[in-house]
Each structure stands twice: as C-alpha cells, then as structure tokens.
Image: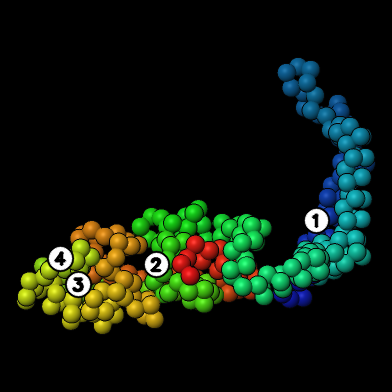
Amino acid sequence: MADLPSDFWAGWITVLTVVSFLGLAWLVFSVYFSANGHADEDSPVWDETLREGSNPAPMWWFWMILALMVLSVVYLMLYPGLGSYSGALRWSQGGRLDESFATYAQEFEATRRLVLAAPFETLHDDERVMESAERIYEQNCAACHGPTGAGQAANFPNIVDDDWQWGGTPEQVEQTLRAGRQAVMPGLAAVLDEATISAVAQHVIAMQSGAEVAAGDPGQTAYATYCSACHGADGSGNTLLGAPNIVDDTAVYGNSVETIATTIANGRFGIMPPFAERLDDAQIHMLVAWLTRDSSP
C-alpha cells in the first residue's frame, strides 16, 4: 500500500476506508441504540399471532462486532491500509522480501561464489549441485522440454543429448540460456510447387540414408539452390546460423517425408525465451553444468 503510484489513489483509498468504517459503525450503533419510533401494537401481525416487531440481534453480537472494529483500528495503525500510510511498524511485503533476499545472500553467498568459480567438470561430480540444478531445470525448463529434458510434443528439442542446434559447448549452451533463440527457417511454398517440395523432402531422406541420388534429380537441384546455403551441401548444418543437421536421425518436428515437406513449405519459427533476467549467474552456471554433464569431452 505504501508504494501506490500517485497521491490521488492513496488519498482515494484512505477516504473509502474511513467512510466505509464510519458507515459500518453508524449502522451497528443505530441498530442497537436508536429509539424505536413505532409501538409494537402498531406493527402488522402475520398469521394471527406473528408480529413484525423491530428487536435487534443479541447483544453479544454487538460486543463481537465492536471488538472486531477495535481490532481493525489497531491493525490500520500498525500496518499499511490507509493509502500511502505505511503503519507504525513500517511493514511491507516488498520490505519483507528484501529481508529474505538479504538473509539468503548472507547465508549462501559464499557457497554461490564457489559454485560460480568451479569448472564444469567439478560440478558434474558434486551430487548436491546437480540436484539443485535439476530443481532449477524442473522449475524453468521442464514445461517445454519435458521432465527429463528429452523434448516433447514434436515442438521442443531434446536438450540432454549432444545435438544442439546452436552448438552444444558450455559457452554456446550458456548463450542459449541467457539470450534465448529464434528459429528462422523460411517457408518456401511461395517459390516451390508441391511436387518440388516433395522431391526435396525425399532428397533429404535419401541424404540421411546415404542412398545415391540420380543425376539431375529435381530434389537435389532444388536443395542446392534453396537449402544448401544454410544447411550445407552435405546437410550437416551450421550452428552459427542455427541451421540444424538434417542428415542425422535427430529432428525436432519429425523425420517423415510429410513432416519434412511441411517444414519446407511453411517454415519453422520456434522461440526459446531468454532467461538472463529470470536466473542469476550461479543458477545459469549450475544449469549449464547439468545440461552438459553427459556430453562427450
């Protein structure tokens, strides 16, 4: 409450709170202590003997409501509740959070510095660090990449193997985590007809299997014209461009002729969000260690 954006809203909330409280006090006291201007004999009678009357609720209700009102006044004096007034105790949710961060930093900062300075090989052998890193993964990454990091839904890649679209070295993985990635596979349906797209897809399958391609094959010709600049003449890809290897058995969206043809026709524009502002340096360092723990040296 003490961090309201303007004095207007702080004042408006104060007025509403005070007026509402005074209105409630007036209502309670008028019910219990106002004079009864209508005699009981003038009240309508229902069902021969049932008289409407105007008797208030039991007095213990009054004392309970009064106690709650006094407690409310004490609360508003001690804690934020009246616009920008911060209360006698100066308590705030933001202040409590700052205190928690300060306590956390005091208790764990030395350990965090050691973790941040440690090489990945050392962290790989530290079970406690790997358990902490796995929890970081579960909280931030598992929703997309699956509980084990093996990918899911034919949209999110496996991130615990050695096949990384933008490179799998610790430095490249860290860059991916910090800055995120944006796939830029353009769709070619505007320049290639369905028959040519299907021929390119079949050519990619042939490249994966190592089968020989006949001279003048339309798929090979179209691949050389539209695809080789990014994926290479041999299909091995280019990590600098984020162009994946398309001749291995790893494919995020599937490896069938139909799926490859859909990719060629419509393109792919997957987004990996950046985590530089969500995770601190020590958390990113541990997460990189966890993701690369099984990678080949």
**Circle 1 residues within 10 Å: few <14, some 14–19, many ≥20:** few
Residue ID for mark 4: 211
Q: Earlier in the sequence, mark 3 or mark 1?
A: 1
Q: Is residue 13 left or right of residue 91?
A: left
Query: Which secondary structure, mark 4?
Result: loop
Q: How is the image coloured?
A: rainbow
Q: Which is more foreground, mark 1 or mark 2?
A: 2
Counting from the top left corner in percent of width and height, residue 74 is at 92, 55
**Circle 4 residues within 10 Å: few <14, some 14–19, many ≥20:** few
Location of residue 271 (image quadrant): bottom left
Counting from the top left corner in percent of width and height, residue 52 is at 79, 28
Question: What's the residue type where badge 1 is placed?
Answer: Ser
Q: Tell me the tag on residue 20.
A: 1
Q: Nearer the viewer, residue 58 or 52?
A: 58
Q: Tell me the tag on residue 163.
A: 2
Query: Which secondary structure, mark 1?
Result: helix
Q: Quadrant of the N terminus?
A: bottom right
Counting from the top left corner in percent of width and height, residue 87 is at 88, 65
Question: What's the residue type where badge 2 is placed?
Answer: Asp
Q: Earlier in the sequence, mark 3 or mark 2?
A: 2
Query: Which secondary structure, mark 2?
Result: loop
CB within 8 Å, label 4 to label 1? no
Residue 20 visible somewhere in the drawing = yes
Q: Is residue 14 left or right of residue 194?
A: right
Q: Earlier in the sequence, mark 4 or mark 3?
A: 3
CB within 8 Å, label 3 to label 1? no
